[in-house]
């Protein structure tokens, strides 16, 4: 939501707190006066009852708090009722014009691809991830989660309608303005969060429009423990600029003109592939340069020359090492706690205390090997050669000698020394990806590294219009009454799928699309 809602939320929290403070201040004042009066009266007339003891003092602050809470409950109930009414509104029968628009939309697919390598400076108003660039009064979708608390949906994409090229279904989409797409990606929402997922801003952008990072936005759950370590808790995905191209269905004339190439359905599939490749480029296979599976397991692995390429790579490596060290330190402490008070000659206690001392000494070595990034060190600048060498030397020592350990780790690939290659791969990929978005960091990323990253930027299922991918039943159920406004498929770079989650599909009736009633867009998500 915009600043108005944010202000209301702030007022809703602040006013009761202020009222409570006023209440306690008055109560203390009244109590102090009463105590003084009682003391004086006790000294002068011990047998006379105090008026304050028999008459209760008025409590206006408490009444104010109660009134505010009651108003908040009424407002919350009204909001829930409005959302429920919108969700349950009937969809009118389709008109002949609507049916014709749906058929046109199915035949014309506006494919979407990453801009890679990124343009510098990044200036597009159309992109996936990141933060939406919006006016001050932007209405960020905010719904009640399963706990009944208001929570903001996750921003996924912003589309500049001026970027949409001419094509067979272009007139179905707005000529100008910006479309914003959101989704319940935190797993804390109920089914109502499949509504109110799209916003449309018809006004042209001005210098006052800025990226908006709203408070109370749902936190994204990491896909695995490794991601949780280096990313931490975040509310938005990485930003990737996008571009568009129409991929039309083959016509009967196109197919018949190539009848000598096979059956009609085979020729049609061949033409579809040619059109996809013309826009996306030929399929790109993963490069072994950054592959953990192709990394050596009995010697030190350096993903590419100059690694760690920037301070970002070094920081990610340090986070992994510190997390592993912290887990071992905490495990030893817990074991000692469980052991309880035992004699100094207890063998297990001696072993654990020795581990504790060794882990403490290793902590100092970690601090010396990985300099802390301070204000003078930019994320995508290159560390000095001697710093790179000491980081790699430390990792080689860790690979060779391991770390003092008492913790039982279930998976071998997450244990030292094999886990080091996992750390190196993630740091190499993420450091290079981030460096390419920075004007000063991009020159450090060589063409061989860019080529090795290319396969991460070749998803082919993002599109506007066209036919939605059928996963279970949603696309089949929606296709006769709704247009596919946007489909977001799996994306390795953005990593916005959760578990076996299939594509996110945003559907809108042709009538709502023509009237620009994008608040009526419905989101479907299914698992593969």
Image: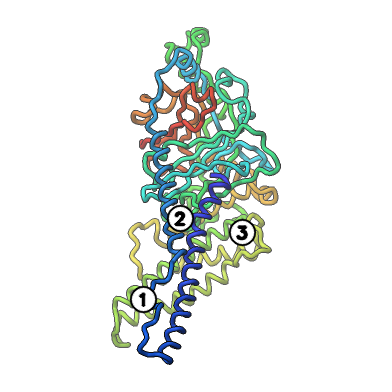
> Which residue is denoted by mark 2 in the rendering?
68
Q: Decide which of tag 3 and tag 1 comes sooner along the chain.
A: 1
Q: Nearer the viewer, residue 217 or 170?
A: 217
- Relative image position of residue 76 (x, y in whole percent): 42, 47
- Closer to the eye: label 3 or 2: 2
Of the two numbered discs 2 and 1 in the rendering, the one whose residue sits closer to the viewer = 1
Task: Please state which of the two labelled residues, at mark 3 or mark 1, is closer to the viewer.
Answer: 1
Provide residue 515's location: percent of width, then percent of height. Answer: 54, 24
Q: Quick check: can you spot residue 461?
A: no
Evaluate if marks 2 and 1 touch, with contact meaning CB atoms under 8 Å apart. Answer: no
Tell me which label, 3 or 2, sits earlier in the chain.
Answer: 2
47 or 162: nearer the viewer: 47
Residue 116 is left or right of residue 295, and the answer is right
In the image, what residue occupies the spot 37% across and 24% down? Answer: 476
465 on left or right of 160: left
Q: CA distance from mark 2 to mark 1?
A: 30 Å
Per the image, the residue denoted by label 1 is 54
Q: Earlier in the sequence, mark 2 or mark 1?
A: 1
Which residue bears the numbered disc 3? 311
Q: What is the spatial separation of the Cα atoms under label 3 and label 1, in whole angstroms?
A: 71 Å
């Amino acid at each position: 939501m915009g600043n108005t809602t944010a202000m209301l939320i702030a007022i809703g929290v602040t006013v009761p707190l202020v009222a409570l403070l006023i209440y306690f201040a008055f109560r203390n004042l009244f109590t102090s006066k009463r105590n003084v009066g009682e003391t004086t009266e006790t000294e002068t007339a011990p047998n006379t009852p105090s008026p304050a003891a028999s008459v209760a003092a008025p409590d206006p602050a408490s009444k104010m708090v109660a009134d505010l809470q009651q108003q908040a409950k009424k407002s919350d109930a009204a909001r829930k009722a409005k959302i429920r009414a919108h969700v349950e509104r009937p969809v009118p029968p389709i008109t002949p014009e609507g049916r014709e628009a749906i058929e046109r939309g199915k035949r014309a697919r506006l494919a979407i691809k990453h801009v890679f390598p990124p343009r510098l400076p990044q200036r597009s108003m159309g992109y996936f991830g990141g933060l939406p660039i919006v006016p001050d009064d932007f209405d960020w979708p905010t719904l009640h989660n399963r706990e009944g608390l208001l929570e903001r949906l996750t921003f996924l994409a912003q589309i500049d309608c001026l970027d949409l090229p001419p094509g067979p279904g272009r007139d179905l989409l707005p000529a100008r303005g910006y479309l914003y797409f959101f989704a319940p990606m935190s797993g804390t929402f109920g089914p109502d969060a499949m509504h109110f997922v799209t916003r449309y801003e018809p006004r042209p952008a001005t210098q006052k429009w800025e990226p908006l990072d709203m408070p109370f936005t749902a936190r994204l759950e990491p896909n695995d423990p490794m991601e949780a370590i280096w990313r931490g808790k975040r509310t938005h995905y990485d930003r990737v600029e996008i571009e568009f191209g129409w991929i039309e269905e083959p016509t009967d004339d196109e197919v018949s003109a190539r009848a000598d190439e096979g059956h009609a359905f085979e020729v049609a599939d061949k033409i579809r592939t040619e059109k996809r490749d013309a826009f996306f480029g030929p399929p790109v296979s993963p490069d072994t340069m950054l592959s953990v599976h192709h990394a050596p397991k009995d010697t030190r692995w350096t993903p590419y020359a100059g690694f760690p390429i920037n301070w970002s790579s070094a920081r990610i490596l340090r986070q992994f090492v510190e997390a592993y060290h912290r887990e071992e330190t905490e495990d030893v402490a817990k074991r000692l706690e469980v052991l309880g008070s035992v004699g100094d000659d207890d063998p297990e206690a001696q072993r654990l205390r020795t581990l504790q001392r060794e882990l403490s000494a290793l902590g100092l070595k970690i601090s010396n090997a990985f300099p802390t990034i301070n204000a003078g060190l930019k994320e995508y600048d290159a560390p000095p050669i001697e710093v790179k060498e000491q980081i790699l030397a430390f990792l080689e020592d860790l690979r060779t000698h391991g770390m003092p350990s008492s913790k039982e780790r279930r998976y071998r690939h997450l244990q030292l020394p094999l886990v080091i290659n996992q750390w190196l791969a993630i740091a190499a990929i993420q450091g290079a990806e981030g460096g390419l978005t920075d004007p000063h960091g991009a020159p450090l990323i060589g063409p061989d590294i860019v080529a090795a990253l290319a396969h991460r930027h070749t998803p082919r299922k993002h599109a506007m219009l066209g036919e939605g991918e059928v996963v279970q039943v949603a696309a089949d159920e929606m296709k006769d009454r709704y247009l596919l406004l946007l489909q977001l498929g799996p994306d390795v770079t953005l990593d916005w799928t959760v578990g076996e989650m299939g594509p996110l599909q945003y559907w809108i009736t042709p009538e709502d699309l023509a009237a620009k009633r994008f608040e009526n867009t419905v989101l479907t998500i299914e698992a593969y």
